[in-house]
Image: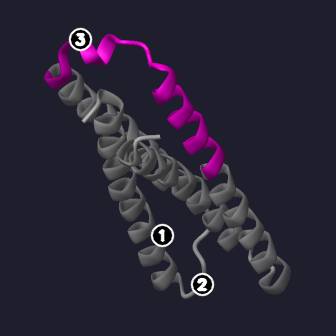
Amino acid sequence: MSFREKTAWGMGLVLILAGIWYFKRVVGLSEALGETAAPNIRFVIGYIVLVVLASILVNIMIASASGKDAEAPADERERAILDKAGHWSGYVLAIGAVAGLWHFSWLKDGNLLFHIVFGALMASQIAEYGFQIFLFRRGV
């Protein structure tokens, strides 16, 4: 398994766990309020701090186990995989954003629109790592 594939696995896991943490808090607050919770800057900052710290830790562990692989530039195959995965993840973001806008046009709930689009951003990045793993495994 290449260094970049290991990184994709680690970052995908970090983002999934951080997304679960964020949405558990949003859903809990929404249930307590009886309506969709407004965007909470503490939750957003907490999510960002969690992702940054966990990704630093995960990448340090992966890099220390990979040796010189961690410092090597991406080869042609890896660059193609990273480009294709980034391209495909853009579709995930677009679908999430359009779904949020469609939902907003019916319910007029701006708070929910924020959470849907923020979730689409999370899903897009998770999908990018998932596509990278798929393409690395497929041998593209």
Name the mark on residue 134.
Answer: none
- Residue beneath disc 3: 68
**Of the residues shown, which amino acid type is indicated by label 2?**
Glu
Measured from the top left, where is residue 77 in percent x and y? 48, 28
Q: Which residues are magenta?
A: 65-88
Q: Within the magenta stretch, is there residue 39?
A: no
Residue at the (33%, 35%) spot, across then down? 7
Q: CB of mark 3 within 8 Å of CB of mark 2?
A: no
Callout in the foreground (3, 1): 3
Q: Within the magenta stretch, is there residue 66?
A: yes
Q: Quadrant of residue 39?
A: bottom right
Residue at the (60%, 51%) spot, across then down? 89
Q: Is residue 101 above or below residue 92?
A: below
Indicate which disc, 1 or 2, sits on the residue closer to the N terminus: 1
Q: Is residue 126 visible?
A: yes
Residue at the (60%, 35%) spot, across then down? 83
Give the tally of numbered discs: 3
Q: Quadrant of residue 67?
A: top left
Prevailing SS of the magenta stretch: helix
> What SS does tag 1 mark?
helix
- Residue beneath disc 2: 35
> What SS does tag 2 mark?
loop
Q: Foreground: 62 or 115?
A: 62
Q: Is residue 42 visible?
A: no
Q: Residues within 10 Å of mark 3 (few under 14, many from 20)?
A: few
Is 103 left or right of 75, judged from the image as shown?
right
Indicate which disc, 3 or 1, sits on the residue closer to the N terminus: 1
Q: Residues within 10 Å of mark 1 (few under 14, many from 20)?
A: some
Quadrant housing the N terminus: top left
- Residue beneath disc 1: 26
